[in-house]
Amino acid sequence: MHEPHADIQPRLVCLPRKDFAPLKFAQLDSMPSDLARLTIIFCVLLAIESVTAGQSDSVYDDIASSLPWMQRIRRDLHKIPELKYTESKTSTLLRKQLDALDIPYQHPFAKHGIVATLGSGKAPCMALRTDMDALPIPEELDVPYKSTHPGLMHACGHDAHMTMLLGAAKYLKAHEAELQGTVKLLFQPAEEGGAGAKVMVDEGAMQGVSAVFGLHVWPTAPSGTIQTRIGTLMAGTDKFLIRVTGISGHGGTPHLVRDSVVAGAAIVMNLQPLISRETDPAQGGIVGITLINSGPGSPNVHAEWVELQGTVNSFSTSGLHHLKSRLEEIVTSTATMYGCKSSIKWNPIAYIPVENSEAMVKRAEQVATQLSQVKHFVYLDRPSFMAEDIAFFNDVAEGAFIFLGIGNASLQTDQKLHTPRFRLDDTMLPVGAALHASVAMQYLQDKQQGKPQVSSTSYRTSIEL
């Protein structure tokens, strides 16, 4: 056995595909035999990966040829933003497109939702999901496809998500005979606080589904970058409205009033130790008072009541329940201490954390790293305190949710979500569609062939392609 050269250290290398050049076999003569054999194996694996990548890119190429069609749909959707559970025009537009593609569907789910079906109608069954609703934000962009609904805007990219799923649907319909199972397309209303996913699950939309995939455009990540993580990706959350009622009175006789404002201020301060002293710093949590209102009145009159609104966030369901329980105790006891009464209203449905399946995330990575339009696949070090109701789909099937970067300063698509100047990079529409279609086809193929869990390079924080 040849001893390895003293200056050669074994190491794992992630080579950018664009920089890869085939090794000349004449160069192998100068290498130790063991290293030469390893080099040959490595080159063969790269060649296989290159062929697979070409197949994935063909999905993208096919879908990208429909980019003008996708842009028209996205901009038509952008013109008609609708709030949670009012998405009637949006649903009508989507169903017209599904009819044109000859894709059968069931409607309604959660008032305006749609479940379309492709494939054999038999197991395995995978779901692809998009959200539908918009936000009460006045749009400031001066574009030809600006919102025609005053005060409303697709400021969270749901118009893009719907378009990407339609793009995937068009491709999958054209290749329906190749599907080794069933694909459900979930067009879900009321993501923005309405827990539409939970309603769709309760109404049977996920019946027979064993896996689910979804994505969200992400302006803080560069275009072509994907971000996600295995396990907890996003927090669970609930919104609250606290009302403290006292006894009003003249500002000159404070001893005769029961001051709701002072009680409310004390509640704000008394809630702070819930995070700083009662929550494990490694686990994290949020108890945030974001709005305070004492209604109309005069500067020399003590307000009869004050309302405090905010959110509670945690990376675990048990942590969320604990924070909610303790908040109720503190609000009640503090209001009582100041001679006031209190009440608390929570959202009808609290959002649970988004939990990503390891197998599905690795499968998404496998697909994404074979698309030349994806430049980086990044594993996030920690979850986000934002919330998403795809969590309810992931709760009943193994799921993967990813963030698709659209940030491009030259196109001004790096404006944050939920802002009036949010703008989309339309070139990412076929990328999102290709990810949807490729993940679904790969999942069905793996399940039919009984393949074990896909291999992964998830030890890397970032993969450059």
Image (cartoon, rainbow, N blue to C red):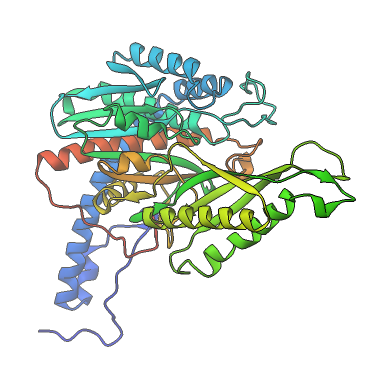
Instruction: Please state if 163 lies on the left or on the right of 10 as rendered.
Output: right
Name the spot of residue 69 as percent of width and height, x first. 45, 20
Name the spot of residue 117 as percent of width and height, x first. 25, 23
The C terminus sits in image quarter: bottom left
Name the spot of residue 348 as percent of width and height, x first. 45, 36
The N terminus sits in image quarter: bottom left
Q: Give the residue displayed 46% in from the left and 30% down from the top.
A: 190
Q: Give the residue displayed 59% in from the left and 47% down from the top.
A: 310
Of all residues shown, which one is farthest toward the front?
256
Q: Is residue 421 above or below residue 339?
A: above
Instruction: Please state if 221 lies on the left or on the right of 296 as rendered.
Output: left
Front one among 450 and 108: 108
Front one among 169 and 263: 263
Q: In this view, does 365 lie above or below 12?
A: above
Q: How many marks?
A: 0
Q: In this view, does 362 lie above or below 3?
A: above
Q: Give the residue displayed 47% in from the left and 66% down from the top.
A: 279
Front one among 111 and 76: 111
Is there any visible trace of residue 18 in the rendered image?
yes
